[in-house]
Amino acid sequence: MPEHDLEEVRVNIAQAFLGEIVAIVGYALLCVAVYKLFQIDSHLVEIKSLLQKTGGKPASDLVTAQLESDSATEYARNLLRAVNAESQHSENEPARSAEPL
């Protein structure tokens, strides 16, 4: 077998191998795209059911109602008020000198 024919066989094998890899990657991308479409569909179904459940009320009313019933939110509000009061108290105090006592 001449050397030229051997090189041609190697090139053909490499082409076939690369073609298979490209096909596998293409199928994988197709599967990921179909999976994403199903995810989008499920999100849209969730959104639709939430919209039907709320009866067309604005989302801000719903969020406010949920936040008012949450004890963690109430704790955060109280903490924010305390920090704000402390901040205002320290702003109203005269500046202290950096001299040691």
Image (cartoon, helix red, strand yellow):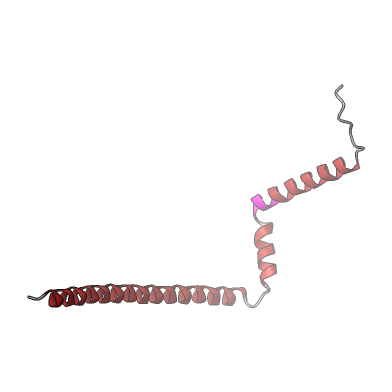
The residue shown at (51%, 73%) is: 46
Q: Which residues are magenta?
A: 70-74
Q: Position of residue 23 (x, y in %)?
A: 29, 77
Q: Position of residue 61 (x, y in %)?
A: 70, 68
Q: Position of residue 14 (x, y in %)?
A: 22, 73
Q: Residue furthest left?
A: 1
- Image quarter of the N terminus: bottom left
Residue 65 painted magenta: no
Number of numbered labels in the structure image: 0
The residue shown at (42%, 75%) is: 38
Viewer-closest of 88 and 65: 88
Question: In the picture provided, is 13 more to the left or to the right than 99?
Answer: left
The residue shown at (85%, 23%) is: 100
Taken as a whole, is the magenta stretch helix, strand or loop? helix
The residue shown at (73%, 46%) is: 79
Viewer-closest of 26 and 79: 26
Please say if 89 is above or below 22.
Answer: above
Question: In the picture provided, is 28 more to the left or to the right than 77?
Answer: left
Question: In the picture provided, is 91 more to the left or to the right than 83?
Answer: right
Viewer-closest of 79 and 13: 13
Q: Residue furthest right?
A: 94
Please say if 52 is above or below 76.
Answer: below
- Image quarter of the C terminus: top right
Please say if 47 is above or below 64.
Answer: below
Q: Position of residue 34 (x, y in %)?
A: 39, 77
